[in-house]
Amino acid sequence: MTEIAQFSELSLYNYSPYDERPKIVWPNGARLAFWVAPNIEFYELNPPTNPHRQPWPHPYPPVPGYSIRDYGNRVGHQRQMALLDKYGVRGSISLSAALCEHHPEIIALCAERNWEFFSHGIYNTRYTYGLTEDQEREMIEDAMDTIERAVGQRPAGYLAPALSHSNHTIDLFAEAGGLYTCDLFHDDQPTWVNTRSGKPFVSIPYSLELNDTIAYVVQKREPRRYGESIRLAFDQLYAEGADSGTVMCIPTHNYQVSCPHRLRAFEEALEYITGHSDVWVTTGREIADYTIAYGRQQLEGSAVVPSA
Amino acid sequence: MSDELLSYPQRHYGMDHDRYRWSMLQDRAPIVWPDNKPLALWINIAVQHFPLSGDKPMVAPPGALTMPYPDLRHYTLRDYGNRVGIFRIMTLMQQYQATPSVAISGALALRYPRLMERLSATGYEWLGHGWNMLCMHAGDIDIATESEWIAQTREALEAFTDQPLKGWLSPGRSQTANTPELLMRNGFSYQCDWVNDELPYPFKTDEGDMTCLPSCLELDDVFVLTQNLHSEESFVQQVSDAADLLIEEGQKQAGRLLALNLHPWLVGQPHRVSAVKNLLEALLVERSDAIWHASPSSIVDAAIDQID
């Protein structure tokens, strides 16, 4: 008999089949919680070399990659913001905290609209990789402090910068006062997260599949096709939400979705979604607060801890 | 090393470099184009020479040869553009009375003088486009070498045109840290490599200000058709969608710019050239009331006095 190798397994959340959970009823009886998460990022022209991941494929100065991302802030931001205003959506911003210092004008526009700011690290060219636990704590707290100083509210959510993680990331963020993570893609409903401090902490569905950068850069979708994918996802989650209570998120980037040849497809999807009743158009923080108040038992039902 | 990962020397207001001032498109003094048209249209045709060489450039430009030496398949496919494709495109441009610019590899002036004579006879504005598609302005290329590439390109092209050469588009939109200064020293007053905006803006160099006229990577034919693998039909749709959105913004806000970049070796192919016809029809016929179609120098000249 061969011995089965032991693997390190994820113990962040418990297991329960989708159709065996208690139903989540969103405020006012809504069946689907809908949120849009614009990533407002700053990529450095000349970041330090990280031994684990190279920030740019292009030698210094990385003009092609840097300049299109700068386009997102210079041109794209206000374009998407006007669209979200039109459809009554408050953005939940995944924010490179240093942008508070570089581009406070953007922060002010979003703050005026009572948008949510959650942490996306300091820069999207600085990774969690290669940091000690103390250094990662310093980076996480620096980002939260910077955002709190700029907007007067401590961020509740975290999407690790450039989706770079350590095994401590979620524990550290919960200990720093965070309430939810966007880094896990295992479900269409919020999930209670086991952290070492035992503080109430949840995973809120963010979506890689509907993320514009994944759709456009990795899956190379045509803009109209991307809009159609969003509508198909909505139809499915909206139908199921009557029995389960679902979350749908569209993560965006101003250097992708706000390009003039792409915005129309996004607008059609937004118009479609917000044209339905029983949709709670909300923010990540509001979903997290509501879920935590709902309670672990009510959320998980008979979920079990999977064996390692 | 690890201290460097948490050190942020450029974390302050504005950009993390000194090339240009931070500002958002929508916050600037409104640009008014001639005849009060909402949208300026710049069409560029990239006339490129890919040498038959086994050398790999530091950064591969789109369309670079990829096979072991001698890569006859890609060499000849690119050469097709200069022998056949360009003439199909010139015929269409004439049919639609378009005024595109041509960005030309300097080496082609030595290799194909007859092509230069034909391009000169069109009256199109000429831009320097590097010596050839293997001489990449990237990384730590020696400054004297890079300077020579630029000077040589100017000299070779000037043998065939009386126009003052003002504009420059680098192969693959790639630059070294020295490229802007070297362009200024060689008499170029605007460059199109930074795709971070949708209007011309002042770009600082040690030799004084030049203008950046941003080209558009995301709607470049090579990007849409060969990198994203979208259909020709979708390409035309995307250009039309972009034009509609920019025209609407131009009417409600201020003048906007649509920049297209076409490659005769790609869209000059018989199964693709109808896409060029369709997009000229969409822009210069169907939307002619809203579009000011002009050479890049005319666009720079019209904008520059209005830029604060």
Image (cartoon, coloured by chain):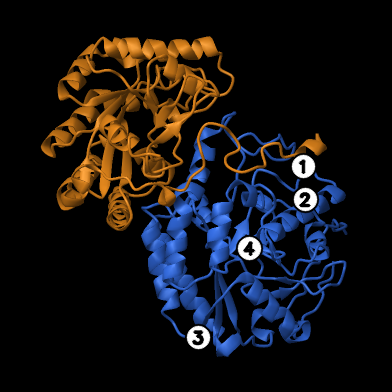
Chain colours: A blue, B orange
- Tell which subunit mark 3 falls on: A
> Is residue B201 positioned above or below B132 on the image?
below
Taking the view exactly as shown, the residue that stands out farthest to the left is B95
Q: Which mark is residue A278?
A: 3
Cα separation between marks 2 and 1? 7 Å
SS category of the residue bearing label 1: loop
Count all numbered tags in the image, as a single digit.
Answer: 4
In the image, taking residue A16 as reference, residue B231 lies left or right, namely: left
Residue count near mark 3 (Cα–Cα under 10 Å), binned few <14, some 14–19, many ≥20:
some
- Tell which subunit mark 1 falls on: B
Is the C-beta separation of discs 3 and 4 under 8 Å? no
- Tell which subunit mark 4 falls on: A
Q: Which mark is residue B6?
A: 1
Residue B307 x %, y %: 37, 39
Q: Kindly identify the residue that appears in the image at 50 percent across and 39 percent down.
A: A67
Badge 4 amino acid = Phe
